[in-house]
Image (cartoon, rainbow, N blue to C red):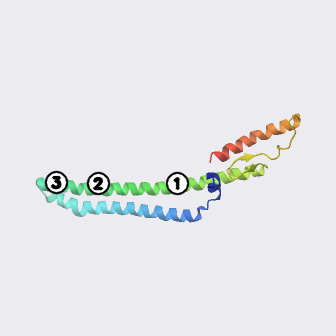
Amino acid sequence: MASEFARLLKQDFSDAKADAEACVTAWRKLSTTMDALTNRHRAHVTGPLHRSWKGDDADSALFFLEDVESRLGVVETEAMAVARVVDTTRIWMESAQTALRNAVRRAEEDRFEVDDDGWVTDPTTADLPRNDPDAQQIVADRSGLLGEYRARITAR
C-alpha cells in the first residue's frame, strides 16, 4: 500500500475540487431551502393557526408544529455545517499538499534525497571519511538542514 506521504504528494485534487465545490453548493442550497421552509411554515401554518386556535388540542397541535419548525432549523444548521466541513477539508488537503511539495522541492534543491515514504537522506555526506575534521564539519552543517527537512516533510 502506498504511504500517506506518496498519496498526498501525488494526489490530483482537480476532480476532487470540482466535486467538493458541487457538494458544498448542494449542502448550502439544502440549508437555504430549510431556512425558507421554516419561514414559510411559520408565516402560513403556525402563525395563522396560533392566533385563532384555542384549547388543549390547539396547544398540543401548536407544540407539534413548532417542533416541526425546530427540526427544519436543525437540518438547516447541520447542512451548513457539513458544507463548511467539506470546504475546509478540501482547503486543508490542498494546503498540506502544497506545503509538502514545497518542502520536498527545497530538500532536493539542497541535494537531499526523499524516498517514496518521505524519508530524507543526504547522499552528499555518505562517502565522506568519518575521521576527517573537515568532513565532520560538513556532516554537522548538513545534519541541521537534514533534520529541518525531515521535520517539515514528516509533519505533513
Label 1 crowding class (10 Å Cα cut-off): few <14, some 14-19, many 20+? Answer: few
| Direction from residue 36 to residue 113 in the image, left or right | right
**Numbered label attached to residue 89:** 1
Three-letter amino acid code at disc 2? Answer: Ser
Q: Secondary structure at mark 1?
A: helix
Q: Secondary structure at mark 2?
A: helix
Which residue is labeled 2 in the image? 70
Three-letter amino acid code at disc 1? Answer: Thr
Q: Is residue 67 above or below residue 125?
A: below
Label 2 crowding class (10 Å Cα cut-off): few <14, some 14-19, many 20+? Answer: few
Image quarter in which the N terminus is found: bottom right
Residue 40 position in % (x across, y down): 28, 63
**Residue at 21% across / 59% down in the picture?**
47
Which residue is labeled 3 in the image? 60
Q: Are marks 2 and 1 in contact (CB under 8 Å)?
A: no
Mark 1–mark 3 distance (CA, rounded to whole Å) = 43 Å
Residue 111 position in % (x across, y down): 79, 49
| Direction from residue 76 to residue 64 in the image, left or right | left
Mark 2–mark 1 distance (CA, rounded to whole Å) = 28 Å
